[in-house]
């Protein structure tokens, strides 16, 4: 699974958690569907266990053939003690990647771009230096993370300035351009030769969002809104721009920013949205995420050819048994059920959205903390293997 963009004192990857398997669930927007009276007790126990283990609060929603189930566990505000909300909006992190890939594939269907176009063709002169060469990297390689480009979130100075400790507290309100983060990545040599293997890098998704702007001639946020948010009626989904606030209803987000002081917890709810632009800035709800992935898998957003391309995968060597497509990943639960998903993390948040390929069974969840990711896979297995349809 992809790296969760957490405090980066060590970026969390669900790949590192695979050995601990079992469970999953999620919240909703003010009900546009009838909420079923059928409970998901196994999933509920799994999220309750994660809260008992130390996650402040979890909001979840599941959709299956029996209807829509939403729940929450724990607290949304540690200081006030208020409960986590079932309808919370939150920062989805790298789940943004699926939105970006969907827009680029729509543009391909419109014959405005080819997946085999080079980055240089659309962003001339941007990717060069230190062995990086946009002439050898394709749009497809950006979307399936086989470009080999260094992940700017692995840069030590960037991490210390924007993601941990006093650096985060001092700079979280800074406005950052996408070019600033790309410059950080290009100050390093490629991790591997383009096309050689899969290696998740947030740099890829920033470049993909810039290509959307170059082709569309308008801000990437407008393309997301016009092509996905508005057509699907995703009323809880937005791009924050430079805003530091979360729309309500929402909870507070928490992080352990100081590794040497593990018991210290900081409220990190506010952060300038530009710091996740293109690869982690979207704000949404569990209900909207489930609606998005359901529509995607059912061909409501992409023609068959482009949906097939999205689901054409390369093996993820960091997570045996998982395979990455174009902005979405495939994984097999412990019981053999295959689902497609994307995870995402920001400082203070961990999110995941998953769906069966037929779009009949979704689950989306969010933790209002940067820690506790080891309990996400158990929640998924609970929902897909022990809950039953």
Image: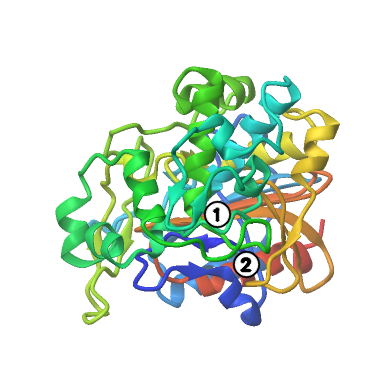
Q: Residues within 10 Å of mark 1 (few under 14, many from 20)?
A: many
> Which quadrant is home to the C terminus?
bottom right
Q: In this rendering, does residue 368 appear at all?
A: no
Q: In this rendering, does residue 197 appear at all?
A: yes
Q: Residue at x 76, y 68 (%)?
A: 333
Q: Tell me the element at label 1.
A: strand
Q: Give yes or no for contact between labels 2 and 1 (Cβ–Cβ under 8 Å).
A: yes
Question: Residue 365 bears which disc, if any?
Answer: 1
Nearer to the camera, 310 or 186: 186
Question: Residue 379 bears which disc, if any?
Answer: 2
Real-space Cα separation, disc 2 to disc 1, in angstroms? 9 Å
- Pick whichever of labels 2 and 1 is earlier in the sequence: 1
**Residue 303 located left or right of residue 319:** right
Spot occupied by residue 291 in the image (x, y as percentages of width and height): 65, 36
Nearer to the camera, 38 or 298: 298
Looking at the image, residue 151 lies above or below residue 360: below
Q: Residue at x 58, y 65 (%)?
A: 192
Nearer to the camera, 54 or 147: 147
> Which quadrant is home to the N terminus?
bottom right
Nearer to the camera, 95 or 374: 95
Spot occupied by residue 271 in the image (x, y as percentages of width and height): 27, 46
Spot occupied by residue 30 in the image (x, y as percentages of width and height): 52, 33
Q: Tell me the element at label 2.
A: helix
Q: Residue at x 21, y 67 (%)?
A: 165
When asked about the image quadrant of residue 51, the answer is bottom left
When asked about the image quadrant of residue 111, the answer is top right
Looking at the image, residue 243 lies above or below residue 202: above
């Amino acid at each position: 699974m992809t790296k969760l963009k957490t405090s980066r004192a060590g970026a969390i990857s669900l790949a590192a958690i695979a050995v601990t398997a079992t469970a999953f669930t999620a919240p909703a927007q003010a009900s546009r569907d009838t909420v079923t009276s059928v409970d998901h007790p196994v999933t509920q126990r799994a999220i309750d266990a994660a809260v008992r283990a130390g996650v402040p609060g979890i909001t979840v929603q599941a959709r299956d053939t029996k209807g829509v189930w939403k729940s929450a566990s724990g607290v949304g505000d540690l200081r006030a003690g208020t409960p986590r909300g079932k309808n919370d909006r939150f920062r989805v992190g790298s789940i943004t990647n699926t939105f970006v890939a969907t827009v680029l594939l729509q543009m391909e269907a419109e014959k405005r771009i080819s997946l085999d176009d080079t980055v240089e063709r659309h962003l001339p002169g941007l990717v060069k230096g230190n062995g990086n060469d946009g002439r050898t990297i394709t749009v497809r390689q950006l979307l399936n993370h086989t470009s080999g480009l260094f992940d700017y979130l692995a840069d030590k100075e960037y991490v210390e300035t924007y993601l941990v400790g006093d650096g985060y507290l001092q700079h979280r309100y800074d406005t950052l351009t996408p070019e600033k983060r790309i410059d950080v990545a290009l100050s390093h040599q490629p991790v591997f030769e383009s096309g050689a293997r899969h290696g998740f890098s947030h740099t890829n998704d920033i470049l993909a969002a810039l290509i959307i702007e170059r082709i569309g001639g308008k801000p990437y946020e407008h393309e997301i809104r016009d092509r996905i948010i508005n057509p699907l009626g995703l009323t809880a989904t937005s791009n924050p721009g430079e805003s530091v606030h979360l729309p309500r209803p929402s909870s507070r987000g928490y992080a352990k920013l100081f590794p040497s002081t593990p018991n210290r917890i900081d409220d990190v709810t506010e952060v300038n949205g530009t710091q996740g632009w293109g690869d982690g800035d979207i704000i949404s709800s569990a209900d909207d995420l489930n609606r998005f992935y359901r529509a995607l898998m059912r061909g409501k957003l992409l023609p068959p050819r482009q949906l097939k391309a999205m689901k054409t995968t390369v093996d993820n060597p960091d997570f045996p048994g998982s395979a990455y497509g174009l902005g979405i990943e495939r994984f097999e639960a412990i019981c053999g059920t295959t689902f497609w998903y994307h995870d995402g993390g920001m400082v203070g948040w961990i999110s995941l959205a998953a769906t069966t390929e037929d779009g009949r069974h979704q689950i989306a969840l969010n933790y209002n903390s940067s820690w506790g990711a080891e309990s996400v896979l158990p929640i998924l297995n609970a929902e897909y293997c022990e809950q039953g349809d």
